[in-house]
Amino acid sequence: MELELEIHVIHYLVISTIMMFCGIYGFFTRKNLLAILISVELMLNATNINFAVFNRYLFPGHLEGHFFSLFGIAIAAAETAVAIAIIINVYRHIKQVLTDDITDMKG
């Protein structure tokens, strides 16, 4: 008798929810801009998991959820490139990447 392991929707949703809440927690508690960027990436990846999972279980023959996930990955890559450029620019001016120090750049 062969043991068949089946992963249900709830398992994917639990992982996605944990990733989302870790991202939200990191976004609101960190002061380092790179840590905030990583937290935003966690939240985006959690939504991509949801797109793929709901597509697989609700519409198994279609690929719309996977296309949305690929679009989300492309948006995340563009967002990361712009954010890293901004972080590098901030570091060049004030030699810190903390959110408290960015207000010093005003004026």
Image (cartoon, rainbow, N blue to C red):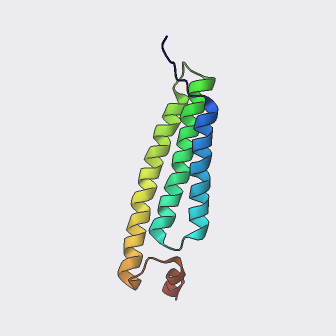
- Could you say which is closer to the camera, residue 23 or residue 66? 23
Q: Position of residue 93 (x, y in %)?
A: 38, 83
Q: How many marks?
A: 0
In the picture, measured across the screen, residue 45 lies left or right of residue 95, that is right
- Could you say which is closer to the camera, residue 3 or residue 22? 3
Give the residue displayed 45% in from the left and 67% down from the top.
Answer: 34
Give the residue displayed 44% in from the left and 64% down from the top.
Answer: 83
Is residue 47 shown above or below 81? above
Q: Position of residue 36 (x, y in %)?
A: 51, 65
Image quadrant of residue 25?
bottom right
In the picture, measured across the screen, residue 50 lies left or right of residue 102, that is right
Image quadrant of residue 95?
bottom left
Give the residue displayed 58% in from the left and 56% down from the top.
Answer: 22
Q: Position of residue 102 (x, y in %)?
A: 50, 80
Give the residue displayed 54% in from the left and 70% down from the top.
Answer: 30
The outermost residue toward the front is: 1
The outermost residue toward the top is: 1
